[in-house]
Image (spheres, rainbow, N blue to C red):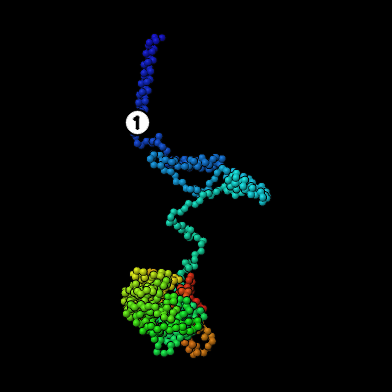
Amino acid sequence: MLPKCVSLSLALSLSHRVVAAAVIMSHFGFENDIHNVLRLDMPITNAPIARWQRKASTSNSTNTNSLSPNKSVNSSVSLSKTPSKTPGKNSKTQNTPSKAGGDRFIPTRNNKQLDVASFLISKENEPVEETSSSTAPKQKAWSVTLNGYDIEEAKILHLGGKPLNAPEGYQNNLKVLYSQVPTPVSIKKSRYISSVPERILDAPDIKNDFYLNLMDWGRQNLLAVGLANHVYLWDAGAGDIVLLKKMEDDSEYICSVSWSKDGNFLAVGTSDCKVELWDVQYQKRLRSMDGHLARVSCLCWNDHVLSSASRSGLIHQHDVRVADHHIFTFGGHTQEVCGLTWSPDGKYLASGGNDNMVYIWPMTTGSEYQAIHSLNEHQGAVKALAWCPWQPNILASGGGTSDRHIRIWNANSGSCISALDTCSQVSSLVFAPNYKELVSGHGFAHDKVIIWKYPSLSKVAELEGKFEIVVLHEVICVVTLLSVEYFNYNKLRIHINSIILLFFQSSVLGHEDRVLNLALSPDASTVASVAADETIRLWKSFEKDAIKKPKLTSSIIQQHIR
């Protein structure tokens, strides 16, 4: 047995060795940890969970909860939320964007709805209890109070929330493609403009004079035409023709006609320097007004004021209500005035003359009778003048053979807005308000009527009377009938030759000489053109929302009224 001192020393030495061994082991473990940390190819065990691992664990927990109906849905919803802060980024928070009302296409469910649905399924096989009309509202009120909704209208899958507003400028192509709203006829189908006149009227002995204005269409649907020394009225509705006036001297002739605004009175300018006023209803001349020193080539009304212009270049203003009719005179043109028209609002009077000038005069009762604008850009005589009905300050003018231009003017500033070279003499202009178009009548070298889109002045159609196949169809039908009726070959040949001659004569449906004047019908659907070929042709090209097609029943041959 060892003494106590020896055993104590042995114990101390043993404890020192254990401590030393522990220190050595801890030092070795520390060095090993330092070595592992410094190695970059080892996985980081204490780092935060990666985003893809977190997403995978969240989806697994959601699927597990969806298979167990007894668990609360709210816990799965809370687990599926994205953390408010991205790990490793303390300065910037990234919140999950929230949509007001949720997504309407994702059903929302809760335990109460599932319980109600289970109750309704168990109740499905039971006989239906008849409820009185008085207790039904009470049951519905109790159900709404207890459950928040009516049990009878409960649904397991409830589409809740309002749809989100689409961003500005977004267009759903599928909605446009599969829309059930019917397309308007005027947009769905293209507009048809017939190149064949609806009717052709005779105008024998009309004077082939570029400077005269021999046709006007009044509000009562009466077309007034000056033929040599006669004035005729044609009723466009009934088709009746009335001889209104015949000049006593056969050497004199009609120079101009113009309807009053209401269409009840007709002003007639003659070559013997007179202006006559006629009551159309009673076919009676009301008065004859003197004052001009040369033929009266153009007339225009502005309410009770009648403007008349002559070859002398003077423009007289007449108040037809009083005996002393002459009010004042505009003097600016140095040659014959051949175009005269008042603006729709009655503020301006535009005049064009053989001196290549266009003047715009104010409606004034003072002592100053000066033009507010003198427009000198035309290089030929200006007869064609027209004010825009939907833009009262816009004036269109057309030049003669040496100019051939259509110009659009701003009457307020006197500036030329646009110009178009038509390559033909411009004899008349009319605005068609139904389609916001400009119609022009032409002389040398085209002799046709052209429709232009306003304000671009792009060509819409040429009304030159091209022959259509419908005439050939009618000729074949007539030949077939004649072959049945006449068995004699010689008689059949004679009739066939006469029909072919009529066929070729009818194939030219446009004007064969220069167009002198244009006039628009009261409903603005038809424009009438009178030409030096002694015909008046009616072109129904502006009917509102009309889809016109060639009519096989109406004969082009029968439309001649000669």
Task: Pinpoint residue 161: horizontal percent, then vertical percent.
Answer: 51, 49
102 over 170 or under it: above or below: above
The x, y position of residue 439, in whole percent, is 41, 74
Q: Is residue 310 visible?
A: yes
Residue 120 percent location from the top left of the image: 62, 46
Is 508 in front, or is 90? Answer: 90
Q: Amino acid at mark 1?
A: Ile
Instruction: Look at the picture and state if 547 lies above or below 10.
Output: below
Q: Nearer the viewer, residue 157 or 333?
A: 333
Q: Nearer the viewer, residue 127 or 21?
A: 127
* Count of labels in the image: 1
Foreground: 551 or 221? 221
Q: Residue at x 34, y 70 (%)?
A: 414
- Relative height, residue 60 to residue 200 (above, below): above
Crowd class of label 1 (few under 14; some 14 to 19; many from 20; radius 10 Å): few
Q: Position of residue 77 (x, y in %)?
A: 50, 42
Q: Name the residue carrying label 1.
A: 34
Q: Quadrant of the image for the N terminus?
A: top left
Which residue does the image show at 62% across and 47% down from the upper left?
141
Q: Quadrant of residue 16?
A: top left
- The residue sitting at 40% across, 76% down in the picture is 341
* Residue 259 visible somewhere in the drawing: no
Name the element at disc 1.
Answer: helix
Quadrant position of residue 463 = bottom left
In the displayed structure image, the side of residue 400 where residue 71 appears, left or right:
right
